[in-house]
Amino acid sequence: MLLSKENVEKINVPGIALPAEESFELPERVLQFGTGVLLRGLPDYYIDKANKEGVFNGRVLVVKSTSSQGADAFDKQNCVYTLCIKGIQDGKQVISYNVNNAISRVLAASNDWQEILQSAHNPELTVVLSNTTEVGIVLSNDSVNDEPPVSFPGKLLAFLYERYKYFKGDGDKGLVILPTELITDNATKLKSILLNLAKQNLLGPEFEGWLLQANDFCNTLVDRIVPGKLPLEQQQQTEAELGYNDELMIMAEPFSLWAIETGSARVRERLSFASVDKGIVLVPSIEKFKEIKLRLLNGTHTFSCAAALGSGFQVVKESMSSDTFSVFVKNLMYKEIGPSILDAYIEPSDVTQFASSVIDRFSNPFLDHRWENIAMNYTSKMNMRNVPLLKKWYNKNMASPAYMAFGFAAYIKFMDSSLEEGKYIATFGGQRVVLQDEFASVLHEYWRDSVTVVAKVLREDSLWGMDLTTYPGFEESVTQYLQEINADGVLKTIEKLNIEWQVEY
């Protein structure tokens, strides 16, 4: 049995969340650019959850950039799909299944552009979503008369202009525009591009005024690991358990966050689905959430990466099964990164809650997040994520941060590479890793002298934008830990470090 609108009522599995029959008749209230798993696993999940609770009562019209060739899975399954949520939450394993029917139709911009423009006439429409990757929000030379315009902003502008003309500039027919692309100030940049495109297309000051005043552009931050399709064996096992086949089935971790920047009552009213899940937050500024995620999640990944590889671990969940390494990660977050980012907006409870969720996420037995992949562009990540943390630490402390210094020492050790057929190869913890790092050659040269390597790396302005040896005791700490790693290995050095910082968890 293939999952579809007709077959939903035949599913008889205890605990699975199913849509009500009448929910298939709900009006389209969301226009979504993209069919990707992040959108289906996060905003579409929230919308479906709200519909099941009778709150939002609206479905999603999806625009895809690729052309439809024959009946794809969305057509065959009436856009119904299963979201499998698997992972650790509050220290306990979680597995749940949700049959999602938030999506009503999927139209291809190349084939169905006039039908897409026709949907701009829908008075029920209130929200626009997008996830067109980081390169999607770019200025182009699109014309609103192209069928379709090439770029995402071009398509959106043509849609908004059609809506403006149809409703004769009605200020109540604007939309809440929520880009989820992982770029800073995503909505602010999109709005600027749309305004420039409107001027290029000579759409007139009246439309420009409607664009800016009737529509709400909200910067957003999304955070959820959505790997997408299950491995074949897991897919077959899950389908056997649920009693149906599903070509659109995807998996997501339990953790979810969608921070939306707004202080508007109009936006809050239109985003009624935000009330159904604590993972959605509507706040005047999302800077707090960006800082917490960047430092506690991404920063912890980066400080831990070389240490994990040097300990012989290949995937994140494997490293968290080690008591020694898991204590290292906890101490890094709770003792150093967390206290460093506390300010007038980030409270201790914010740090504790998010750090706890990071431990759950790192420990997820259903995800194979490879440390080797995390090590890509290692130097740039260290600079962007963790050098600012050092500054924050030293603004509050004079002593060197032990775990951050160890993370730096492990990074320097990992970057000790050999040059083989034009590639820089790191051999660490019994693993050979091809360095995909634009600064691999710089570190390779500095490692020609193991006595001076730490000082040279820390002082290199082109890497860090500053001289890190100016921080009291930092060079000495990094040097000491590098010597201990060389003498005793990574895990033995971490064990000694943990003993010095014994904390009960």
Image: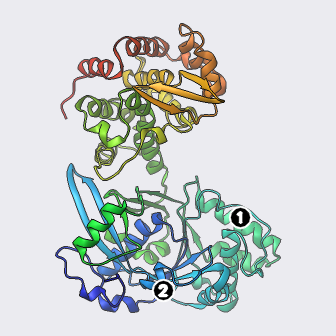
Under mark 1, the amino acid is Ile
> Residue drawn at (45%, 89%), measured in percent from left and top?
27
Q: Along the polypeptide, which appears first: circle 2 or circle 1?
A: 2
In the figure, 470 relative to 438: above or below? above
Mark 2 sits on what residue?
A: 28
Under mark 2, the amino acid is Glu
Under tag 2, what secondary structure? strand
The quarter of the rendered structure image containing the N terminus is bottom left
In the figure, 161 relative to 229: above or below? below
Under tag 1, what secondary structure? helix
The x and y percentages for residue 222 are 46, 58
> Residue drawn at (44%, 84%), measured in percent from left and top?
76
Q: Quadrant of residue 81?
A: bottom left
The quarter of the rendered structure image containing the C terminus is top left
Q: Are marks 2 and 1 in contact (CB under 8 Å)?
A: no
In the figure, 467 relative to 114: above or below? above
> Residue drawn at (44%, 50%), measured in percent from left and top?
289
The x and y percentages for residue 269 are 43, 77
Question: From this viewpoint, is residue 34 visible?
Answer: yes
Q: Tell me: 48 left or right of 160.
A: left
Q: Nearer the viewer, residue 190 or 422?
A: 422
Q: Residues within 10 Å of mark 2 (few under 14, many from 20)?
A: many
> Residue drawn at (41%, 64%), measured in percent from left and top?
229
Q: Nearer the viewer, residue 77 or 56?
A: 77
Q: Nearer the viewer, residue 423 or 197?
A: 423
Q: Residues within 10 Å of mark 1 (few under 14, many from 20)?
A: some
